[in-house]
Structures are given as structure tokens and as C-alpha cells.
Amino acid sequence: MVHGRIIDCCSLINLRTGWGGLSELSEFGWQWYLCEAVLKEAEHTREYGKDGLPVSVPIDLGELTANQALGIVGLRTEEELLDYLEFASEVDDGEAQALAIAKHRGLMLLTDDRKAIRLASRPDVAVATISTVDVLRVWAALSPENAMRLGEILRRIENLARFSPRKDSPDYRWWGHCRDEA
């Protein structure tokens, strides 16, 4: 069973925006990782300003690196570097680096990027993936308090991170139901 998860940039922004931070990662009992390319890509997110309208805010790298459940990793072998270069011809740098590291270190990739998911499922790559929705479902099931906050978190992700499952996704109905329930 895979216990470590590596997060791509969009999923990081989705979760950071939804929760308003990343301290919730420690609730899972899993080790989470960010690769160096994702740190370079994850510069801004959005938050509600004093007037209630979305404003761009910088992501505090200190917040990311201070989280005990979140390790920062880089490419460390020639095999990881070669796969990263190959994958970067098909997906963004953050997804490519996270995928290369996941492949060689036996990690699961947290991504919502369809190209990255297809690439991860190739037999020569064979990296298991999870999505933002998967993480939020598990998180909501961890406690009644989490479940009560879920609607607000999904609305924040939609409005601020501009993410929701596609209409043809099996998660679309669940998302809409949970978002509108609270």
C-alpha cells in the first residue's frame, strides 16, 4: 500500500484555497510531498478581500515548508531526471517532476490534470493517482466537524481556485450535492 502522496500545483492550490491553509494534511496519517518545481509554480492563490471579492494573494512558502506533514523533495537520480524530461514534453513542469518522483519512489500522485492522469496510467509509468475530490471525500469522513465544513470548502474551491469536477465526471453530482447541502 502506498502511504506517501506527492501533490501537483493545481491540487495544492485547490486544497490550500479550500481549507485556507494546509494544516488539514496532518489529519490523514499519510506523508505528503511537494516537489521543487511545484514550489516554483505555486506563487499565488486567491482569497476573499475585505469587500468580499476575490483577490490574488501570494502563497507563503514558509507556511508550506513549516507543515510537518509536508516534505519538500527534488530530483535525486538520473532516472528521475530522464523521466522528468520525457514527461515535461507532455505535461507542465510541476506535474512532470511530481510524476517522475512518484514513479521512482513509489508515491501516489495527487492531480486533477487529465493529461497527467493518462500519463500516470501508462504501463511504463504505472503511478497510482488520486484527485482533489478523493482527498476531500476522505477528509470529510474523518470527523463530523470536517463533514460539516465540506460545503463551504467546495464553494471556496469553486469560487477562488476556479475548480470543480467536469460535468462528465462521476464526481460531478457528489460535488454539487455536498456544495449545496450546507
Image (cartoon, rainbow, N blue to C red):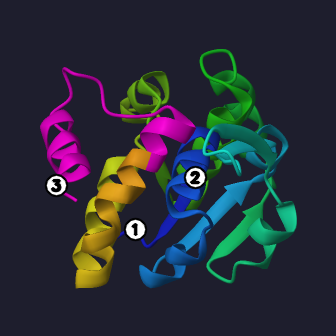
Which residue sits at x=60%, y=69%? 22
Kindly identify which residue carries mark 2: 17
Left or right of 21 on screen, residue 123: left
> On screen, 38 above or below 3?
above
**In the image, is residue 5 part of the stretch drawn in magenta?**
no
Q: Which residues are magenta?
A: 156-182
Mark 1 near mark 2, Cβ–Cβ under 8 Å? no
> The C terminus is located in which quarter?
bottom left
Residue flagged by tag 1: what amino acid is it?
Answer: Val
Q: Name the disc covering residue 35, or none.
A: none
Residue flagged by tag 2: what amino acid is it?
Answer: Thr
Element type at marker 3?
helix
**First along the sequence among labels 1 and 2:** 1
Q: Quadrant of residue 53?
A: top right
Kindly identify which residue carries mark 1: 2
Kindly identify which residue carries mark 3: 181
Between the residue at mark 1 and the residue at mark 2, the CA separation in whole angstroms equals 26 Å
| Residue 37 at x, y percent in the picture | 79, 42
Q: Is the residue marked by circle 3 packed among few (<14), some (14-19), or many (20+) residues within 10 Å?
A: few
